[in-house]
Image (cartoon, rainbow, N blue to C red):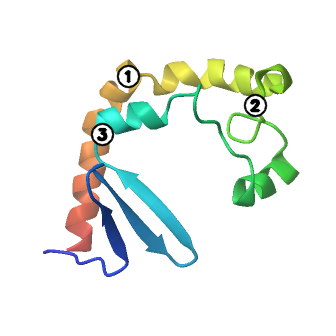
Amino acid sequence: METEFTNCNWVPGINSFLLTLTESVVHFISTQELANELCDEKRFRKFVGGPLGQVRAFAGDGLFTAQTYPEKEAEPNWGKAHRILMPAFGPQSIQQMLPNMLDIGNLSRLHLY
C-alpha cells in the first residue's frame, strides 16, 4: 500500500521534506549527517515557547521545559533531569529496547491492515 502526501514538499539537495499538518509545518530529515548538524548545541538552541511554553507554565522547569540558553542563565533542573534520564536513553539502552520496539511496530502495522 502506497501513501501519497498532498501536503508534503521535498526540499531538494538536503535530504529532507516539509509536511504541513493543520497549522504547523514539520521538517523531516533523512540522514545522520544532517541530524548531527541540527543537534549541534553550539549553533542551535532549544526554544521553550508555543505548546512547550504552556506545559512549562503549569509543570515548571524540567528536561524539556527548562531554559538552557544563555548558558549562564540555564536552569539547574535541566541538568538534573538530563543526568537521571540519559542512561535510560543512551545507545546501549536503546539497542536493548530495539527487539521490543520492532515487535510493537509490526503488531501495529498488522492491526492497521
Q: Nearer the viewer, residue 12 or 47?
A: 12
Mark 1 vs 2, N-terminal side: 2
Q: Are marks 3 and 1 in contact (CB under 8 Å)?
A: no
Residue at x 32% of width, y 25% of height: 96
Residue at x 75% of width, y 31% of height: 69
For the C terminus, the image quarter is bottom left
**Residue 3: x %, y % from top left:** 21, 75
Most extreme residue toward the front is 13
Residue corresponding to mark 1: 91
Residue at x 42% of width, y 33% of height: 37
Residue corresponding to mark 2: 69
For the N terminus, the image quarter is bottom left
How far apart, in angstroms, are the residues tagged by discs 1 and 2?
26 Å
User: Residue flagged by tag 1: what amino acid is it?
Assistant: Pro
User: Residue flagged by tag 2: what amino acid is it?
Assistant: Tyr
Q: Is residue 60 above or below residue 36?
A: below
How far apart, in angstroms, are the residues tagged by discs 3 and 1?
15 Å
**Residue 59: x %, y % from top left:** 82, 47
Label 3 environment density (alpha carbons within 10 Å; few <14, some 14–19, many ≥20) = few
Q: Is residue 50 above or below residue 100?
A: below
Q: Nearer the viewer, residue 83 or 27?
A: 27
Q: Which mark is residue 100?
A: 3
- Write down the quadrant of residue 43 in the picture: top right
Which element is circle 2 on? loop
How far apart, in angstroms, are the residues tagged by discs 3 and 2?
36 Å
**How many discs appear?**
3
Residue at x 48% of width, y 27% of height: 89
Residue 76 vs residue 82: left or right? right
Mark 3 vs 2, N-terminal side: 2
Q: Which mark is residue 29?
A: none
Which element is circle 1 on? helix
